[in-house]
Amino acid sequence: MLMIKAIIRPDKTATVLSELCDAGFPAVTKLDVVGRGKQRGVKVGDIFYDEIPKQMLLVVIRDEDKDDIVKIITKNAKTGTKGAFGDGKIFITPVEEAYTISSGANKL
């Protein structure tokens, strides 16, 4: 199993979540986060913002679903057709164990 961590623009979250659900991946954890990429923040007039609001989506999936999930997130989180700085990142990590708290069952 894999965990996909997608950090995206807050205004793209509803669309990404809807598309994931429609594709059969309704189980998602959503977190409000702040951060910056290699551009090191944004300057608007005289004000410099180095902590930019984003949302992180966490999805645990079967290995074989990885490409589909990445395509869904990329397509729906991208700004316009070409994308833009600040659209976000997707990180994929292995999940070695997972337990359901209520039953204690190992879900892998």
Image: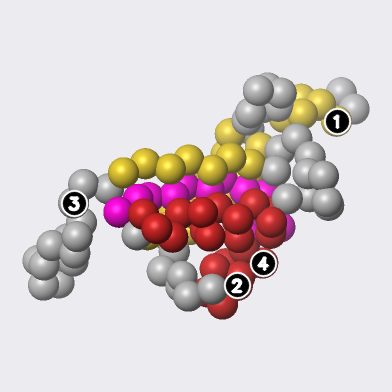
The residue singled out by tag 4 in the image is 15
**Mark seen at residue 100:** none
> Label 4, label 2: how many angstroms apart (C-alpha)?
5 Å
Sequence-first disc among 1 and 4? 4
Q: Amino acid at mark 1?
A: Val
Quarter occupied by residue 38: top right
Q: Amino acid at mark 4?
A: Thr
Badge 1 or badge 2: first in the primary sequence: 2
Apparent side of residue 53 relative to residue 46 in the rendered image (left or right) = left
The magenta segment is: 1-14
Rendering quarter of residue 18: bottom right
Residue 28's place in the image compared with 91, above or below, is: below
- Please tell me which of labels 1 and 3 falls first in the chain: 1
According to the picture, the residue beneath numbered tag 3 turns out to be: 97
Q: Is residue 31 visible?
A: no
Q: Where is residue 45 drawn, in percent x and y?
A: 90, 27
Earlier along the polypeptide chain: callout 3 or callout 2?
2
Residue sitting at the far right: 45
**Can residue 43 be seen at all in this image of the molecule?**
yes
Q: Viewed as shown, does residue 62 lie left or right of 29?
A: left
Q: CA distance from mark 1 to mark 4?
A: 27 Å
Query: Are circles 1 and 3 on residues that touch, CB within 8 Å?
Result: no
* Residue identifier under label 1: 44
Q: Secondary structure at mark 4?
A: helix
- Give left or right: position of 103 versus 45: left
Q: Quadrant of residue 93?
A: top left
The residue to which callout 2 is attached is 18
Marks 4, 3: nearer the viewer: 3
> How many angstroms separate mark 3 from mark 2 (CA)?
27 Å
**Residues at marks 4 and 3, CA–CA distance in whole angstroms:** 30 Å
